[in-house]
Amino acid sequence: MKRILEVAIKTIKESGNILLNYIGEEKEIELKGISNLVTQVDKLSERHILKSIEENFPDHSILTEETGFINKNSEYTWIVDPLDGTTNYAHNFPFFGISIALIKNKEIILGLIYDPIRDELFYAIKNEGAYLNDRRIEVSKTESLKNSLISFAFPYELSLEEKNFIPFINFSSRTHGIRRTGSAAIEIAYVGCGRLDGFWAKKLKPWDISAGILIVEEAKGKVTDFSGNNIDIHTDNILFSNGKIHQEMIKILNLGKIFIRNRNEKF
């Protein structure tokens, strides 16, 4: 695992430098959907990560956002998001990152999320804790939703009928605030280090969440679906929290209508 971690850290930081090298420059943008962008820099970053993995671990399978699944019939699979927050990046909004996870026999054993703007590397090793630039991290100690700061992610293809708007409104009246930065991976990492108390989303992909799942769990947080069930990397709806506000968040996520109350009132 030591060598695997060393290669992963070197690779993710090198890809971070690729992203930084193109900041402020005009991007070649393609649309995968009305608000789902991909740039040439996504592809450059992904090619670098693929090359590194294939050179160092040629027998490992790889799942990436842009290339798809490279099946080597291995017990190991790398899951790669070469640029999480592409829309931010395309507009030179400085909130984006890279996410890399390693799965062994369906269990996440390594997760890394790198923010090159702030040079912050979040990573976790199964059963060995979570770290930010080699400093051990844990989730926040916030005891109640009313004192929390949380965040969320909308699906790429969003319609006015989406039920995401209902929890957004219901949470707004019961927390210190809600944030939406445009990089799910970074926001999940922020739950792991205590900058956020919770995060919820629907329709994220394995490359958005795999590294973050391990980071939050190893930081002593909690990860479930909206009903409190255990999840895997393909779960359609996912909730991350410090554990202390988890049940309160589940209650609000399952409200079927807008339900405004004073944030100090209890259900």
Image (tube, helix red, strand yellow):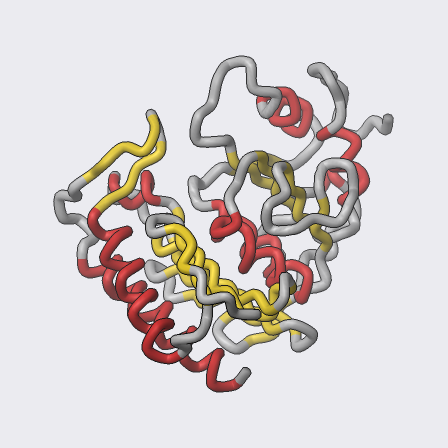
Quadrant (top left/top right/bottom left/bottom right) for the C terminus? top right
Residue 30 in the image: above or below residue 254: below
Residue 89 in the image: above or below residue 154: below
Q: Is 21 positioned to the left or the right of 136 in the image?
A: left
**Residue 146 lies in what quarter of the image?**
top right
Q: Is 55 positioned to the left or the right of 145 in the image?
A: left
Q: Locate residue 127, reporting x and y percent.
A: 69, 74
Residue at 79%, 50% in the rendered image: 244
Quadrant (top left/top right/bottom left/bottom right) for the N terminus? bottom right
Q: 172 or 89, which lies in front?
A: 89
Residue at 61%, 53% in the rendered image: 191
Q: Locate residue 39, reporting x and y percent.
A: 24, 44
Q: 26 or 203, which lies in front?
A: 203
In this view, the residue farthest toward the left is 26
Residue 31 in the image: above or below residue 213: above
**Residue 161 lies in what quarter of the image?**
top right
Q: Locate residue 14, reporting x and y percent.
A: 29, 70
Residue at 60%, 73% in the rendered image: 125
Residue 218 in the image: above or below residue 212: below
Q: Locate residue 152, reporting x and y percent.
A: 56, 37
